[in-house]
Amino acid sequence: MPDTTHVRLRKFNTKETYPEQNLDNDLCQAVVANGVVYLRGQIGQDLETRESVGIGDVVAQTEQAMKNIKMLLDEAGSRLEDIVKVTVYIIDPRYREDVYRTMGTWLKGVFPVSTGIVVQALARPEWLVEIDAIAVVGEVASA
């Protein structure tokens, strides 16, 4: 029987995270299940202080999102090199080059699959980009 143990990292409740909204959901930043790491979408927000960073600056927000992704993968026993899929959400198609160029410096040589989506808005008006990732724990054989 396969191991179905789930490890949930950095649990939180949306009551505290979004006090301006009428929410009450138990979530976490990362779940490790059966050797796969699923990350919550990361934005220009410091995970320790919950403060938004890079307001009005899509490059700074992308840097923070990727910094968060790296930190969460490290905590989950994985690495940037173990990312297999990223999904990028931007609120303006003109941000695409800046976001992908910045993200690309973090993922050089990784070759994940990627989906990019333009959305009307993110959870807070100051957020311009959100990136989520799926990774594996440990090395992946390269082709």
Image (cartoon, grey):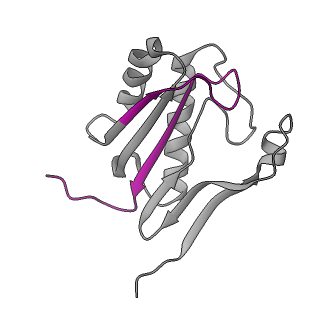
Is 139 part of what is drawn in magenta? yes
Decide: is 37 above or below 129: below
Q: Residue 105 lies in what quarter of the image?
A: top left
Decide: is 28 above or below 62: below
Which residue is pictured at 44% across the width and 29% down the height? 117
- In the rendered view, does 34 fall on the left or right side of 8? left
Number of marks: 0
Tell me where residue 92 appears, x and y as whole percent. 51, 16
- In the rendered view, does 65 fall on the left or right side of 97? right
Residue furthest to the bottom in view is 1
Q: Nearer the viewer, residue 68 or 126?
A: 126
Residue furthest to the front in view is 120
Decide: is 7 above or below 65: below
Decide: is 32 above or below 68: below
Residue furthest to the left in view is 143
Which residue is pictured at 34% across the width and 37% down the height? 114
Q: Nearer the viewer, residue 69 or 22?
A: 22
Q: Nearer the viewer, residue 97 or 68?
A: 97
Tell me where residue 135 appears, x and y as whole percent. 40, 53
In the image, which residues are magenta? Answer: 115-143
Tell me where residue 50 appears, x and y as whole percent. 74, 37
Which residue is pictured at 45% across the width and 45% down the height? 133
Q: Nearer the viewer, residue 108 or 23?
A: 23
